[in-house]
Image (tube, helix red, strand yellow):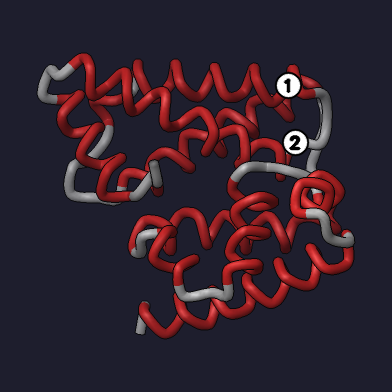
């Protein structure tokens, strides 16, 4: 099942209205999204990523009343996730390298605004199938380039090129949609 902004938002609002099953379903759907988010940013042990996912799920649960129903859910979610990541970096005494800052900011801007405004499945549906699969594998599911290449049975450079071209096309599409 595809996780869409609209679906996540509906589960969140239903959970706020007292539907415990919707809230539980929301938390389950957030796990792979948060894993992918943290794997791209926290270069370290898988335990750190899992800890951050759990801390974020707890924060989503305990701070759910702060969610503004009139705003995009994923923007709120990724803001919570960024705060948890910053807290983690402060605890372990590690700052993000400057080289990665630009890529991280672009990725965060894409996640906070574009995913919230456009359905990611629809966006990927406009790409050639291989580009969509490689973006989904490396950017959404958190696989490394080597892992995605192995799963797909293609070379790592082919994965990198597919992701690069696909992201370039997505950014052009998103920028066009936002005008």
Q: Quadrant of the N terminus?
A: top left
Foreground of the two, 80 or 157: 157
Q: How many marks?
A: 2
Q: Which mark is residue 48?
A: 1
Q: Residue at x 42, y 59 (%)?
A: 121
The quadrant where residue 67 appears? top left
Q: Which mark is residue 129?
A: none
The quadrant where residue 73 appears? top left
Q: Contact, CB < 8 Å: mark 1 with mark 2?
A: yes
Q: Quadrant of the C terminus?
A: bottom left
Q: Judging from the image, what secondary structure is the residue with disc 1 in?
A: helix
Q: Judging from the image, what secondary structure is the residue with disc 2 in?
A: loop
Q: Which residue is mark 2?
A: 42
Vertical arrangement, residue 32 with respect to residue 70, above or below: above
Q: How far across and how far down the image is residue 17, in percent?
A: 10, 24
Q: Give me the C-alpha separation between circle 1 and circle 2.
A: 8 Å
Q: How far across and how far down the image is residue 76, in percent?
A: 38, 42
Q: How far across and how far down the image is residue 25, in percent?
A: 32, 24
């Amino acid at each position: 099942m595809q996780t869409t902004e609209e679906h996540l938002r509906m589960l969140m609002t239903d959970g706020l209205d007292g539907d415990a099953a919707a809230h539980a379903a929301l938390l389950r759907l957030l796990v792979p999204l948060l894993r992918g988010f943290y794997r791209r940013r926290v270069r370290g042990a898988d335990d750190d990523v899992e800890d951050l996912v759990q801390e974020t799920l707890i924060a989503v649960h305990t701070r759910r009343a702060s969610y503004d129903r009139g705003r995009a859910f994923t923007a709120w979610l990724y803001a919570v996730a960024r705060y948890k990541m910053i807290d983690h970096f402060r605890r372990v005494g590690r700052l993000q390298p400057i080289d990665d800052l630009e890529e991280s900011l672009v990725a965060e801007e894409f996640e906070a605004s574009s995913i919230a405004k456009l359905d990611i499945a629809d966006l990927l549906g406009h790409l050639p199938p291989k580009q969509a699969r490689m973006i989904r594998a490396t950017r959404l599911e958190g696989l490394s380039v080597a892992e995605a290449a192995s799963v797909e049975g293609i070379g790592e450079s082919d994965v990198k090129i597919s992701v690069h071209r696909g992201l370039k096309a997505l950014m052009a599409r998103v920028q066009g949609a936002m005008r």
